[in-house]
Amino acid sequence: MVFRPHKVAVFVDGCYWHGCPLHGVRDHKVNEWYWPAKIQRNVERDRDTDHQLRAIGWEVIRVWEHEDPGLAAVRIESVVRSRKPKCPGDTSINSQIEESPEMGTEDDR
């Protein structure tokens, strides 16, 4: 999700694909040579994305798939409300929510 006027980007990361420290570590039975490196590349890409967005003034929020949605929503709302809009127009949170298009392919996850 993107809250453009507030420059807040929200990512919901899958535990397996993004290396969750609680649920993402597994013994791979098939292609064990491939999966650990693939997941590590995903983690590195996530860190790079965070760095690039922060470098241009965005706040990045990452939510794990196992997190309570209500608690995640409270955290997101708190950050969005704390940031002043960066462009003119409607500043209400509800009117600023937009889902960002999925990036990459299934193989990229």
Image (cartoon, rainbow, N blue to C red):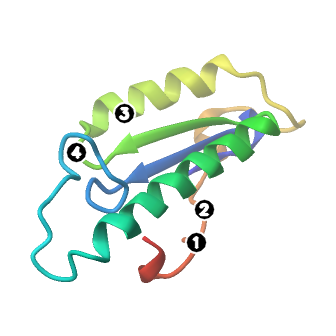
Q: CA distance from mark 4 to mark 3?
A: 10 Å
Say what secondary structure mark 1 lies in: loop
List x then y, in percent, for residue 46.
53, 52
What mark, if any, has residue 103 been given in the picture?
1
Closer to the N terminus: mark 3 or mark 1? 3
Q: Are marks 2 and 1 in contact (CB under 8 Å)?
A: yes
In the picture, residue 101 is in which quadrant? bottom right
Crowd rating for badge 4 (residues with CA inside 10 Å; few <14, some 14–19, many 20+): few
- Residue on which the image places disc 2: 100
Instruction: Name which residue type carries label 4.
Output: His
Quadrant of the frame with the C terminus: bottom left
Closer to the N terminus: mark 1 or mark 4? 4
- Residue on which the image places disc 3: 72
Instruction: Name which residue type carries label 3.
Output: Ala
- Residue on which the image places disc 4: 66
List x then y, in percent, for residue 1.
55, 51
Instruction: Name which residue type carries label 2.
Output: Ser
